[in-house]
Amino acid sequence: MKVIPVPVRSDNYAYLLVDEQTKEAAAVDIYDVPKVTAKAKEENVKITSLLTTHHHQDHSGGNEAFASQNPSIKIYGGSSRCSAMTDEVKDGDVLKVGANITVKCMATPCHTQDSICFYVTDSQTSQKGVFTGDTLFIGGCGRFFEGTGAEMNKALSSLGTLPDETVTYPGHEYTASNFKFGISVEPDNEAIKKGIKLAQENKITTGLTTIADEKQFNVLMRLGSEAI
């Protein structure tokens, strides 16, 4: 399994989730079709499906354009509000990418009520990752546009049950600002200090941290700790 981040707009991420055996890929939150398809061509992979984390334009906005060029493409999303969606997915639904990648859908309503996180595993390499859209960011979480704090806490707690080694792939590059907030809440947290250094040293931080890390440096996943 190979995950290729494709920065789009000012701070969004689209992704290619590639099954390296078959060279088939799912595009996650494609948005900028020319940019993502150019990256697929560069990597010599074929996009066979689209995964949409939620309906907001900066995530689902490329679906319709891609579908117009590829009318048989499967476009998965949490509701019909996702542009050009062909297949609605619910919590617990399972999809496949290529021969080896399994995608488990996790409903995480709050940022939007149709927010879906995609937990992916590779049967050949045992790699694990999760595409979290605007639910979980590195060191933070999304705004509660359509939900409550209780819903977000439930969503983050659900993501926290994934294996510790699961690599996180969020929808935006907000890492530096998230840790700026985090250190104001937990000024003595060494994990947050390391996160600040990570953000300083890497313009692109997606794919560099795990669920285990989130439990150490994301104050919004540490609500039960004494310091918070």
Image: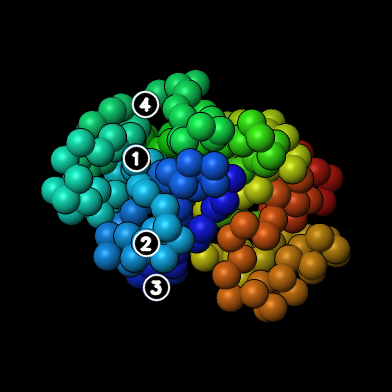
Q: Point out residue 41 in the picture as x, y percentages from the top left corner.
A: 37, 61
Q: Find numbered disc 3 in the image and state the secondary structure of the residue it sits on.
A: loop
Between residue 152 and residue 117, name the one nearer to us. Answer: 117
Q: Earlier in the sequence, mark 1 or mark 3?
A: 3
Disc 1 to disc 2: CB gap under 8 Å: no
Q: As shown in the figure, which amino acid type bears the numbered disc 2?
A: Lys
Mark 2 or mark 4: which is in front? 2
Query: Can you give x and y, in whole percent of width and height, for residue 84 in the image?
Result: 19, 40
* SS at mark 2 in the image: helix
Q: What residue is disc 3 on?
A: 10
Question: Mark 2 Cα within 10 Å, few/some/many (few <14, many 20+)?
Answer: few
Q: From the top left corner, tell me how far across and down residue 72 is, in percent.
A: 20, 36
- Residue 154 visible to the viewer: yes
* Front: mark 1 or 4: 1
Which is nearer the N-term, disc 1 or disc 4? 1
- Nearest-to-viewer mark from 3 and 2: 2
Say whether residue 189 is left or right of residue 86: right
Residue matched to label 2: 41
Where does label 4 land, which residue?
Answer: 89
Instruction: Say whether marks 3 and 2 touch (CB < 8 Å).
Output: no
The residue type indicated by label 4 comes to: Val
